[in-house]
Image: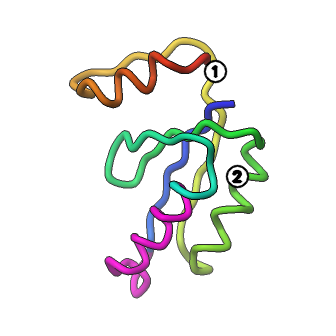
Amino acid sequence: MILLVAYDLTTPNDTPANYELIISAIKSKFNSWCRIEQSVWLVDSGVNAVAARDILRAFMHDKDVLFVAPILGAWAGRYLGDDRTNWLNGRQF
């Protein structure tokens, strides 16, 4: 299942160290991942959105924002570059 993960770390937790914590969690906890934008990722996961949220919130603070949703069907993008486009083309939605 491909999940969209978007987050926003809130002050005072929006430090480089806190961003690195959530980024490292995404990279280590999911089978495969693609960073679409600064705080927007797609992850190839064997778990549903609720389970993914629960995994990631362990690496966040109470007031940090987190959104996780499945991506189903076709996708479209613009100026994603080869790496992201190849990752997307290699997945079934």
Main secondary-structure element of the magenta-colored stretch: helix
- Report the residue at 50% width, 42% height from top: 33
Say whether residue 21 is magenta: yes
Report, in whole angstroms, how far the alpha carbon at label 1 lies from the one at label 2. 16 Å
The amino acid sitting under disc 1 is Leu
Q: Which residues are magenta?
A: 10-26
- Report the residue at 45% width, 23% height from top: 88
Q: How crowded is the residue under tag 1: few (<14 C-alpha within 10 Å), some, or many (20+)? A: few
Secondary structure, mark 2, is helix
Depth check, front residue: 70 or 83: 83
The number of numbered discs placed on residues in the rendered structure image is 2
Quarter of the figure that contains the N terminus: top right
- With 33 as the anchor, is 79 left or right in this view? left
Using the image, determine if residue 21 lies above or below residue 11.
above
The image quadrant of residue 55 is bottom right
Residue 43 percent location from the top left of the image? 56, 41
Q: Which residue bears the numbered disc 2?
A: 52
Farthest residue in the bottom direction?
12
- With 19 as the anchor, is 30 left or right in this view? right
The amino acid sitting under disc 2 is Ala
Using the image, determine if residue 61 lies above or below residue 26.
below
Which one is in front in this view, the residue at disc 1 or the one at disc 2? 2
Residue 46 percent location from the top left of the image? 75, 39
Secondary structure, mark 1, is loop
- With 27 as the anchor, is 45 left or right in this view? right
Q: Which residue bears the numbered disc 1?
A: 72
Residue 42 percent location from the top left of the image? 51, 39
